[in-house]
Structure formats: C-alpha cells, structure tokens
Image: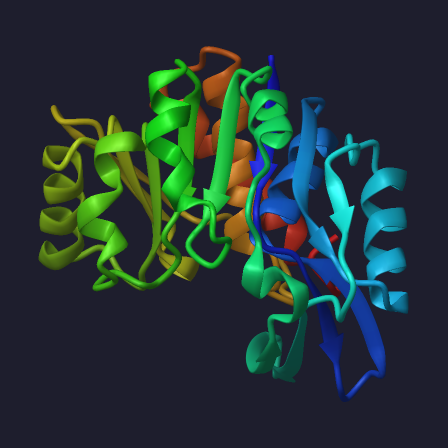
Amino acid sequence: MKAATVGDNCMDVYLSRQESYPGGNPVNVAVYLKRLGGDASYIGWVGTDSYGEQMRRAIRDKGIDVSHLHQKEGQTAVTYVELIGNDRKFGDYHEGVMEHFVLTEADLRFIEGHALVHAGIWGHAETYFPRFKEKGLITSFDFSDQLHHDLTRRLPAFVDYAFFSYTQDDAYIHSYLKETHALGARVAVATLGENGSLAYDGERYFRREAEAVTVVDTMGAGDSFIAGFLHGIMNGLPLTQCLEQGTRAAAQTITYFGAW
C-alpha cells in the first residue's frame, strides 16, 4: 500500500545555528512513512534556487518518489525558526512558489494510483479532496492548530482521518473531535504535546500518553505522529495500536535537531 503526500514544503532555517533542514508537513509525513517501512510519493513545487535543489535531493535520498515534485521559477518556501530551550518557535515564513500551487491532471492521475493521500492546511490541496474521496482513496488531512479555520467545517466530509494539534485532554477537545466526526470524518485525532494524544471514532475515545524521552527539538513531532498513525492504518491495525505507533514515532523525532 503506497501513500501520496501533497502540498507544502519549506526549508526550516535555524537562525541561531545557521543551519537549514528540509521540512513541511507532507514532506515530513512521506519521509517518516518511509522510515517506518512504508512507501510514499511527494507531490509539490520547489523553486529554482539552491534550497529547491537541496529539498529535492534530500527527499529523493530518503527513498521518496519525487517524479511529481516540480521546479518552478522563483524561491522555495522558507520558515525561519528559533529554539526557545528545546521548543521550536516559528518566525517569518516566505511561501515562495508554493503560493500558487495547483495540481495538473497528470498529477491527479498519479495520486489516484496510490491507496492513501495526505495533505495539510497550508498546502493548497484541499480543493482536490472531494475527487480523492470519490476515487476511493483513504484520505488524511492535518488541520494543525487551526481549530477555528473555515476548512475545519467544510472538509471533514471528505477526510477519513482528520488530525488536529491542541494542548490538553479537556471537555473542549472531546466535544470538538466528536463534532468533527459528525461532520463526516471517520476518525478525528488530536495530538496534545506532552499530554499525549486523543482519538474519537464515533463510538468511543482512545487515549495515549506521551513517551518520556530527552527532548532536543520538537520540530516534526506532530508530523511523525501522523506518519506512525497512518502506517498503522495502512497495515490494518486497530486505533489503539495506531496511536501507539504515532506516539513512538514522535518520541524518536524529538531527540534530534530538525524534522529528519
């Protein structure tokens, strides 16, 4: 079973360290899926600058299919990152060529040759999800911490696995996940940082505590959780084990600098 991840990429530039790392939710999810033994393609745009070549080379070298990673005239997306202790804080973001990202018919047919498709809220891919759902793909979408974005109301009807980022296990997030399921999502999942994760499938809630590890950099924690969870789904595991795989993957990621 092969996954397609679609949309945003960016170079995470750590100003204090003068280092840059490839990232972006769909890119990270593809790389983490591969690390877990899965098979993935990434579909997106990079610029004609040195960051674009760095991004393509890094993704390709991780074993990801980049046959539909297109180079467009202009700048690759960049996010400037600061580390406050061991926690990363995002600064200025320049979207570059990804601002005008669209999928061609050839891209869409390529994606439809996969079993699962994943995208995120900043990736300009949401308009294609009705088609993906109609074509029978397993659909996954990361809404990040944008719990009040208009897409959280419109898109769950076309999303099997809806992911959100929150902070704690409270009445609000329980109600929110239940409502997301009612809007059409098969399963709604919230990562809660150091407080673990929570999922709702329409019948019950599933809770998983975070693993205790030495934190170096939290970059990519949520993306690796999603990859671990989806790897479980692609292998037919129950939700409890999907949460376990996601938690284990996230714990590994936060023990080193950069997303991967």
Q: Position of residue 89 (x, y in %)?
A: 55, 80
**Which of the two residues, 35 or 146, is positioned nearer the viewer here?**
146
Answer whether residue 245 is visible to the viewer in this image: no
Answer whether residue 58 is visible to the viewer in this image: yes
Q: Position of residue 6 (x, y in %)?
A: 57, 41
The residue at 60%/40% (across/down) is 249
**Image quadrant in which you'd find residue 167:** bottom left
**Colour convention:** rainbow
The residue at 58%/25% (across/down) is 111
Q: Position of residue 223 (x, y in %)?
A: 55, 48
**Image quadrant in which you'd find residue 179:** top left
Left or right for 98, reference 165 = right
Q: Position of residue 253 (x, y in %)?
A: 66, 51
**Image quadrant in which you'd find residue 161:** top left
Residue 94 in the image: above or below residue 11: below
The residue at 85%/83% (across/down) is 18
